[in-house]
């Protein structure tokens, strides 16, 4: 619908609401007079009831969630109250001529008390509910327009690389896979010739690479020899040595012991050899 059509629809609605208010205005004015209102109060009474209905309708269009449901309840309550008072005005002819008894809206006392309570409580309810609706409308912060405005500003200030990608073009069809001929399998494994019995494997000329110091945990534990056992091994290993060859380093390598023990063995062996000529002379 264009702008002219919308304007015409709103104008027709205002006209219909105005005529309906005029019809209801007479009934509510006469009811206000019957409940003891003066001429000025009776003239303003219809605006209190039907005017709050219009305010609640506007608040319903603006508010959301729980506040909107509250405005709908107020609108329904005051619409029902206006309907009841207009109905009573149609049932009591005395209200039309202004000769009805003061405070008398029905012949049955309980019904009369309820109607008088309803008519007199509507102005107080208008003050309370109208103030609450206005406060809710003034404090209402729509979220969707603000978020949309922020999104628009963010997109406007983005640089070209940050903007979203354009709609991709049509995807080209996938190439048709052609079946290739099966590859020719060539047997490259040579038959293993049997090794004749008694053949010795040739020594590899490849030098051994030093792997560093062997950890203690990986070494084979050697038995601990006593001093007498070391001395016996040293005597046996150096039996045919000359005195000049009897050194600590030579003894250490021969019996595979420490340098300190090798020096001790050297001194002991030299002392034993020095004592041999003396014993022979004696």
Image (tube, grey):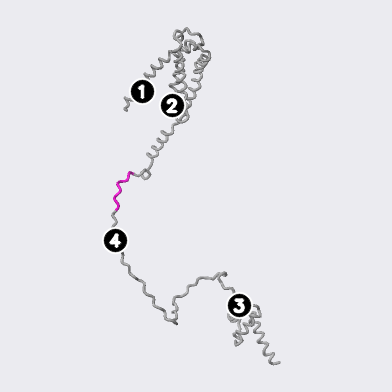
In this rendering, the answer to whether 263 lies above or below 158 is below
Rendering coords of residue 86 (x, y %): 44, 15
Q: Kindly check if marks 3 and 4 are in contact, taking CB atoms under 8 A apart as contact.
A: no
Q: Which residue is mark 3?
A: 257
In percent of the image, x 39 and y 77: which residue is there?
193
Q: Quadrant of the C terminus?
A: bottom right
Rendering coords of residue 89 (x, y %): 45, 13
* C-alpha distance separating marks 3 and 4: 73 Å
Q: Which region of the structure is painted magenta?
A: 166-174
Dot 1 falls on a residue whose secondary structure is helix
Q: Nearer the viewer, residue 147 or 269?
A: 147
Q: Furthest-front residue in view?
A: 108
Q: Residues within 10 Å of mark 3 (few under 14, many from 20)?
A: some
Residue 180, numbered label: 4
**Among numbered discs 2 and 3, the one appearing first in the sequence:** 2
> Is residue 133 covered in magenta?
no
* C-alpha distance separating marks 4 and 1: 76 Å
Does any portion of residue 36 appear in the rendered image? no
Rendering coords of residue 162 (x, y %): 38, 44
Q: Kindly check if marks 4 and 2 are in contact, taking CB atoms under 8 A apart as contact.
A: no
User: Is residue 86 rendered to the left or right of residue 282?
Assistant: left
In this rendering, the answer to whether 160 lies above or below 33 is below
Q: Which residue is mark 2?
A: 60
């Amino acid at each position: 619908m264009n702008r002219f059509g919308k304007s015409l629809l709103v104008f027709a609605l205002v006209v219909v609401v105005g005529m309906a208010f005029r019809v209801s205005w007479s009934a509510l004015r006469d009811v206000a007079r019957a409940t003891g209102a003066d001429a000025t109060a009776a003239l303003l009474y219809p605006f209190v009831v039907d005017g709050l209905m219009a305010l609640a309708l506007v608040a319903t269009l603006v508010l959301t969630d729980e506040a909107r449901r509250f405005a709908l309840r107020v609108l329904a309550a005051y619409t029902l109250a206006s309907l009841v008072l207009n109905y009573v005005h149609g049932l009591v002819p005395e209200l039309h001529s202004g000769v009805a008894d003061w405070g008398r809206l029905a012949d049955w006392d309980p019904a009369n008390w309820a109607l008088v309570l309803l008519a007199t409580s509507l102005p107080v309810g208008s003050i309370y509910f109208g103030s609450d609706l206005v406060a809710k409308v003034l404090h209402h912060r729509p979220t969707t327009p603000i978020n949309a405005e922020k999104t628009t500003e963010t997109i406007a200030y983005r640089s070209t690389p940050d903007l979203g990608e354009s709609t991709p073009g049509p995807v080209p069809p996938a190439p048709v896979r052609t079946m290739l001929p099966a590859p020719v399998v060539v047997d490259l494994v040579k038959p293993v010739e049997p090794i004749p019995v008694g053949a010795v494997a040739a020594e590899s000329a490849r030098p051994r690479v030093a792997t560093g110091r062997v950890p203690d945990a990986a070494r084979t534990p050697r038995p601990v020899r006593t001093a007498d056992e070391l001395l016996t091994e040293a005597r046996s290993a150096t039996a045919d040595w000359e005195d000049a060859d009897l050194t600590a380093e030579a003894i250490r390598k021969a019996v595979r012991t420490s340098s300190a023990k090798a020096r001790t063995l050297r001194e002991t062996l030299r002392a034993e050899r020095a004592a041999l000529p003396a014993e022979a002379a004696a």
